[in-house]
Each structure stands twice: as C-alpha cells, then as structure tokens.
Amino acid sequence: MNEEQILLKDFLENKPLYSEVSIKKDFPMYNTTSVNFREMVYFCDICESIKPLHNDCDDYNFFSIAYTDKETMIFRRFSCVSCQKFYKEFLIRLVKVDGKSCTLMKVGEYPQKQLPKSKTLSKFFREDKAEYNKAVICIANGYGVAAFAYMRRIVEKNILSLLDQIQESVSQDSAISNSINELKATSPMSDRIRIANSALPDYLKPDGFNPLGQIYGLLSDGVHSLSDSECLDKAENIQVCLEFLISELAAHKQNKEEFKKRLDALRK
Ligand SMILES: [Zn+2]
C-alpha cells in the first residue's frame, strides 16, 4: 500500500464524520485523474468477525476528478468479501482540488460506526461509566476538546487504582515499588512524569516506551493551548496507553497464577 492508500484506509475505517483527508497527487489541469482504492477492513455483522470489504466499483475506482471540479459528492460501497451481504457505504465530499493535492471530507457513513468502546476500559472505569461513555461518544464524533477533558477527568480519578494494580504485580521492596510510592505522594506533574519512567517493570515498557510516563505527560497538557484535532489525538493516546497497561497487567497476573498452580501440582 502506498501513502495515499494508507491514508484512505484510515480515513474510511477510523475517522469520524466531517473529518478531512488530504491526498497528495498530481491533478493536472486538462485531465481527469482517478484514485483507486480496493480494500478496507471492518467488523462484519453477518460473519461476526473482522473481514476485508472490497470496493464495489469496477477497477476499484474510488473517485475520478478533474482539476476544475468543485464540491463534487462521491458515493462508494464496500462489501464483505466472505458473505457478500454486509456492506459499508460512504458519502465523501470533494472539498478542494489543485495541481498537487485534493482534500476530501467524510459526510456520510452507513451503517453507523459502532462506538469503539473498550471492554477493558469499561471495566476499569466502572465507577465513572457515564463519563467514560461521554468520552467515547466525543472521540467517535471527533469532538476533541470535550473528549480530552472527559478522558483527563476520569483518568485523574482512577490513576491511583492503576498504580495499585502495577504495585501488586511487583515485589514490595523493589525500586519500582518505591517509585510508585513516590508517584502516589508527589504532586508537581513534572516530577510525576520523571518518576513514572522508573515505575514500570520491563514487560510494561514495549521497546522501551513508557505508557505510564506518556499518560502523565498527556494529563499535564493544557486544553487551552491545543487545537480540537490535537486534543482528539491526545484523548485517543491516553486510551491506547491505559488499555495496554490494564490488559498486560491482567494477562501477566493470570500467567503468574497459572504457572504457580502448575508448579504446585508438580511439587505434590
Ligand atoms: Zn461478512
């Protein structure tokens, strides 16, 4: 897949209504230029699993536009390759085109995108269910400032319980456990970001990336100075980091318990 295909795939699969994508390509003055796009992936309601959905158009044409086109509407349908029954339809508006690029806006999507609510996070935020729902709705609709505000609020309320869970997974007199105690007691955010970097065991730091430090960093960003789309990115980042930490912690705990059980059985 080239860069334009990757952008279009992400645009169709993930972006909320009224978001835009810019395709860099030559759109010469006197010709119609075609952009083809074959395959997106989506959860098929009929197959009940994630499936490739193919563009129903001949030659997988996604749109063909001329340099002079204005405010054109593009309608495309993508059908599940397995059942051929489930489909997604999109209405895309051409916002502008010039010699080097064109901008498209997603103005319609059917069936409606399911809210990307995480089971792991729903469980973690069970005390703050209503606010977590609002954060998810805001993310799905691209209301970045609101999504970030809701997300920060519930994370700030629940971060101590996350620290407790991490602490339970390490030995009590370890350096990591001490760092977590320090995190619970320290108030300036700049210190917390620094300490967070030594408060995670290695298995929670994929490729050296520290999701806890990332969460603290995101919590310290002010909503005032950020654009709507920057806020949306940050709300999504918090979600991804939290989900990683919580699900890895749970998996680790389960593995450890199973291993202990087997060991006990062997020792008998
Ligand atoms: Zn299907």
Image (spheres, rainbow, N blue to C red):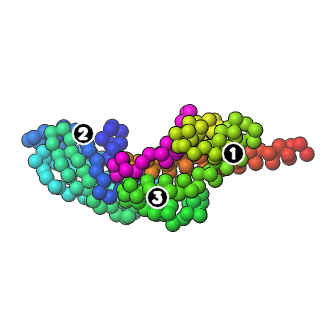
For the residues bearing labels 3 and 1, Cβ distance under 8 angstroms? no
| Residue identified by numbered label 2 | 24
Depicted 188 relative to depicted 86: above or below: above
Residue drawn 46% across the image and 63% down it: 134
Left or right, 199 with respect to 154, comes to: right
Mark nearer the N terminus (2 vs 1): 2
Q: Give the alpha-carbon distance from disc 2 to disc 3, as whole Å.
A: 35 Å
The x and y percentages for residue 177 are: 70, 40
Mark nearer the N terminus (2 vs 3): 2
Residue type, numbered disc 1: Gln
Mark 3 is surrounded, within 10 Å at the Cα level, by few (under 14), some (14 to 19) or many (20 or more) other residues, namely some
Residue type, numbered disc 2: Lys
Quarter of image, res 89: bottom left
Q: Give the alpha-carbon distance from disc 3 to disc 1, as whole Å.
A: 26 Å
The x and y percentages for residue 205 are: 59, 37
The stretch of residues the image draws in magenta is 207-229
Q: Nearer the viewer, mark 2 or mark 1?
A: 1
Mark 2 is surrounded, within 10 Å at the Cα level, by few (under 14), some (14 to 19) or many (20 or more) other residues, namely some
| Residue identified by numbered label 3 | 150
